[in-house]
Image (spheres, helix red, strand yellow):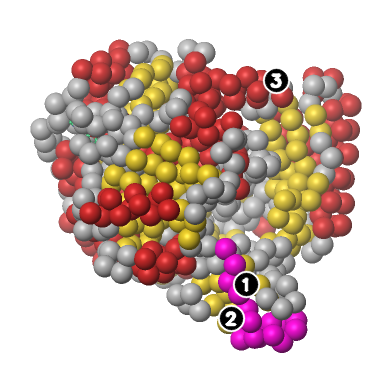
Amino acid sequence: MSAVFFQVICDVPVAVSATGIFDYLPPLNMPESSAESWVGRAVLVDFGRQTLVGLVVGLSEHSDVPVQKLKRVKAAVPFVPLADAAWLDLIRFISKYYLRGLGEVALPALPIALRNGRGLLFDEACGTVSLRTGQAAWKKWQKIQHQPAPLQLAQPLQLTQTQTDVLKALHTDERRTQLLFGVTGSGKTEVYLQYLAEILSRDADSQVLILVPEINLTPQFSLRLVERFGADAVVTLHSKLTESVRLLNFWRAASGHARVILGTRLAVLTMLPHLKAIVVDEEHDASYRQMEGVRYSARDVAIYRAHQLKIPIVLGSATPSLETWHNARSGRYGLHRLAQRAVSGSVLPTVQLIDVQKNAVQDGISNTVRNALDRAMNARQTSLLFQNRRGYAPVLYCGHCGYVHDCSACSAHFVYHQTTRRLHCHHCGRDERVPSVCAKCGNADMLPVGQGTQRLEESVKKSWPNAVVRRVDADTTRKKGELEEVLADISAGVVDVVIGTQMLAKGHDWAHLTTVGVLDVDSGLFAQDYRAPERLFALMQQVIGRAGRGQVAGHVYIQTGFVEHPLWGSILGHDYEGYANDELAVREQLGLPPFSAHALLHVAAANIKLALGFANEVRLLAIQLIDENPEFASMTVNAAVPMNMVRVNQLERAQMLIESPSRARLQAFAPLLQAAILAQKSRLNWLLEIDPAEI
Ligand code: ADP
Ligand code: ZN
């Protein structure tokens, strides 16, 4: 009789185990014949001093670890559906592509209550596991029929001719990935819905996944989905759900019960046994990039998932990412255009640049914008003031000695928040009481300098005392329900002026919003990162796209100190294609993505010297690898440099960029380099990021 070992993946960093796979003995009393049935199951295991949840990914007859050292799987965790082979394949792909452990990728796809030993109770005597919290959710789930929910299809909108043509083309085009390139307000959502309705009605169990970039877009979208497909069929998944809702929605999705899954980036990893199509709305959005833990792009993972399952995927945007545009232009992706707004009579708004050197500006708002706000209020329309900086003032400054209050842990100024009367660091989260006198010279005259959303709100309320003003930023929407409430008010048309950061700029569809003032985005014109212009262009089209979506024409005013900057020309002309083609030509000339691929080493240490020192050691390792392997000769290893913002949360950070003319080459190189770095056994905090979002 041969022994059987369980290969279990646990959420541990690559520095602990490069593969993330650990051998365990089967649970006590397991009949050997049932071993196969454990593959894909979640199990409770002892790991060091902790109890962890892991997933069985395979069986083996050998283990490199002596049997007497191996521990036994304690029990199966019955609250996690069986991971099927396709899902495990997806996890393997992400783990390999982004150079992270299997468990690091897989376990975060489960609700937190199911992913660590703390959320679960183990009964030693009977060898069973129960839920510590979440029993209420489990009871609810037990009452639901564990079968695919039937659809309750409602009447769709009558499509415009262009929408009809595009819908037809989406169904007939044989390419796996389709770009739906439609201006803001062109009715992409309705096209998605009818496209998905058709796919859903082909089988009684089919599931579809819709990704949106921001949590704040889910309430409105989810309402439309529920209207169209019925409440039973639709679930929402994002990180701000309460634990019990998250659990219930996870079970509904992962068991195959829910048919339409709407979610933010984390939803792309959900187990979906009958997935038949994916839609990625606003596919260009930087929020699809996971910036903590495994740094994956949810859009790219979605494209891979569709490829793996041989199912179609639709990417939608008014301003596609240049990677996507490049693929659409070259014919690799299908390309479908919606060039007009869907609502008849609705046209793209006029856009005007306001030169803040010449136009009188008071409290950050120019006279032209003030007049426009007056007109909108008189006509009972809603206005949006876009200010992409939260807090009251970004700097607290001593009028006497010039001292500025900086965060003690970061190379960043403290931001003054009037609402809490404290100084907040937006990078590490520290906050402090506002000092009554300057810490350096004792002068009592501390001045808030610059403008954030709180200060703007104050000045708008001062100028228009009778106006209904709502500020929407991360600070006003932290508590549960706050965001839904303010979005409902805006939808109802009872708000005169909305003040918002970029979380409000995307996707929303408010018919009575006619006037938009963009107050300060000049820093985006001169940012270092090569993607900064692309991002500013997309952001501006999004902000502009909020205006005039109903029958009344919209007007957008952009305040800038640099009216001559060439980027404004293409923004004013709503000319995405012209802009994208020019920008791609520049990228090609400079050998930047999508004409090359990047990997970025991040190192964080107690001081920058240490960080740079290690980054340079890695640089030498990379150069050595290239010297030893002629196929890597075309790679470029750049010098290690301090990061733009050197210090965050008491760590100083360096980075080193590796460039490759081909993605395949980088894919071959990166794991070798990672292995060489791991062999150094450095105690420093480091990470090799593939396709970095910023360099
Ligand atoms: P996008 O996602 O392209 O920015 P939306 O899908 O939000 O645009 O559509 C913009 C507006 O047009 C919405 O209010 C939507 O209800 C409306 N709309 C879309 N298609 C149609 C149609 N065929 N007939 C009438 N109104 C439509
Ligand atoms: Zn800080």
Q: Which mark is residue 434?
A: 2
Write down the residue under mark 1.
Answer: 396
User: x, y (%) of residue 547?
Assistant: 32, 41
Q: Which is more toward the observer, 176 or 398?
A: 398
Residue visible at 48% across and 12% down in the picture: 331
**1 or 3: tag closer to the N-terminus:** 1
User: x, y (%) of residue 126?
Assistant: 38, 67
Residue type of the residue flagged with mark 1: Leu
Q: Secondary structure at mark 2?
A: loop
Image quadrant where residue 425 sits: bottom right
Residue mark closest to the camera, 1 vs 3? 1
**3 or 2: tag closer to the N-terminus:** 2
Write down the residue under mark 3.
Answer: 589
Q: Which mark is residue 97?
A: none
Image quadrant where residue 406 sits: bottom right
Image quadrant where residue 405 sits: bottom right
Residue visible at 16% across and 38% down in the picture: 228
Contact between marks 2 and 1 (CB within 8 A): the answer is yes
